[in-house]
Amino acid sequence: MSAPLTVYPIAGLPEVLPGDDLAGLFCRAAEQAGTALADGDVAVFAQKVVSKAEGSRVALSEVRPSERALDWARQWNKDARLVEVVLRESRRIVRMERGILIAETRHGFVCANAGVDVSNSGTGDVAILLPEDPDRSARRLRAGIAAATGRQVGVIVADSFGRPWRNGLTQAALGVAGLAPLLDLRGRADADGRPMHVTVIAVADELAGAADLVCGKTRRVPAALIRGWSGLLEAGGAQPGAGRDLVRPAEEDLFR
Amino acid sequence: MSAPLTVYPIAGLPEVLPGDDLAGLFCRAAEQAGTALADGDVAVFAQKVVSKAEGSRVALSEVRPSERALDWARQWNKDARLVEVVLRESRRIVRMERGILIAETRHGFVCANAGVDVSNSGTGDVAILLPEDPDRSARRLRAGIAAATGRQVGVIVADSFGRPWRNGLTQAALGVAGLAPLLDLRGRADADGRPMHVTVIAVADELAGAADLVCGKTRRVPAALIRGWSGLLEAGGAQPGAGRDLVRPAEEDLFR
């Protein structure tokens, strides 16, 4: 039997502020929770806490909405400043109807509001943006964890996205470091000895989703630790890869 | 701190044949693996093993392909009999280009080849279809597990689907019994006290994905057991719901 996979919620982080050492805060919280890091663990961080630590934010009071943002906001009863931030974060608008704005971000992610979220900082409303480069964020967090603990772990920076055709959000991996985001089984034989033709598993998204199950949305649990993921071993000598590998190139996508 | 979530692979099931008592086989395999079922566990079954037990299959030798199937098969070097089965299983063809056939099944799932897979039964090639009613399959498995062990568990019947915009497959929940597939947080306050407007989490899909991480595709691990999922408690007095709740109605879908 393969070993089980265990997903630990990592609570107890303080409110994260720009410039904070998120890796250090995570390691201390994990240790205090009795789940000190081990080699091969996977640390999953909610995008929002990563963006907060990186200062990836805009004060809405300083945003001057364009005509386009004003129009849309009037039509759908939205905050025009927030709409303006969403439009600026978008490389392409995929759908803009029924009050829903689905955009392709500069990273290539397709999601509601270009991943922009509103938060109250205590001094007014602030739009939290996606990290500028989630893969770089993941690499930095991985290096920070190694510096703090000496442990080599995988890191995922995750956010919850909607999907066409299905209700509800699932968490997906935006940034990845230290693990292969895709498990490529093409060419291997299945249990019947038949070669499998289209079996590439987005394991980083499944790991991100598993983390979401313990993080919840109303509790202050911005991170999770996953133990028992053997993906690094299965990937063999291959390069671990990055979150951008999960973005399907436009020319291979039937739904752009 | 919330409790951790643990995902156990359940291996050791024999090759499943039509009419087999899959619930009973699962309970025995779980017990032999040292993970006897407890109340509140979630059992996740790969669709393929459920379909095999239910006899949801077609012998390709008995299929007469239509002209449309023959044309497509010639153009893309496919097995016309298999294409014919896919077309019969489809309520609507969503995309049919570059050799890729993405269909909406009669259940409303949008997936490659209408979820049809090929398997070798020993007597020739057999197309394995999705279960006729995956929610009914899940309810029967749940009742079978209760009969065999006295335990009240959640059950998910799962399959791996591709997604627009992102590379790789993730496992999704087709049939659900005994648990709420969607965790509806709308109206609850987030950690900042701000009401959350669009936060419905597809937890059954995230549970299905977590199970996929231990099941793998080349090993004979057709099922998993998830312990520590508190979703039943969080759903409070609400009806648990079904896998069909995860299918977004066409009129609310911007991508049909």
Image (cartoon, coloured by chain):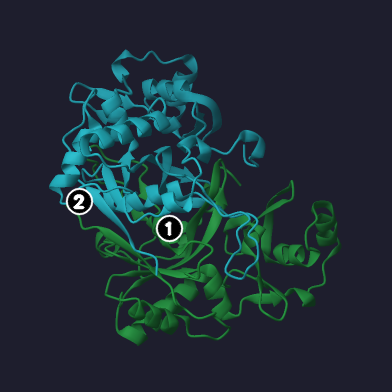
Chain colours: A green, B cyan
Q: Residues within 10 Å of mark 2 (few under 14, many from 20)?
A: some
Indicate left or right for B4 with B244 as reference. left
What amino acid is labelled 2 in the image? Thr
Callout 1 crowding tier (Cα within 10 Å): few <14, some 14–19, many ≥20: many
Residue lying furthest left: B32
Count of labels shown?
A: 2
User: In this view, which residue lies farthest toward the front?
Assistant: B237
The residue that disc 2 covers is: B35
Name the spot of residue B237 as percent of width and height, x first.
49, 45
Between residues A254 and A230, which one lies in front from this camera angle? A230
- Marks 2 and 1, how far apart at CA: 21 Å
Which quarter of the figure has residue A231? bottom left
Q: Secondary structure at mark 1?
A: helix
Compared with residue B141, is residue B191 higher up or lower down, i.e. above or below? below
Residue A96 on image: x %, y % = 73, 50
Q: Which residue carries the number 1 mark?
A: A213
Return the chain for callout 2. Answer: B
Quick check: B34 above or below A45?
above
The quarter of the picture where residue B27 lies is top left
Residue A170, horizontal then vertical, whole percent: 50, 53
Q: Can residue A129 be seen in this snapshot?
A: yes
Q: Which residue is at a point 49% across and 75% down the rendered structure image? A: A137
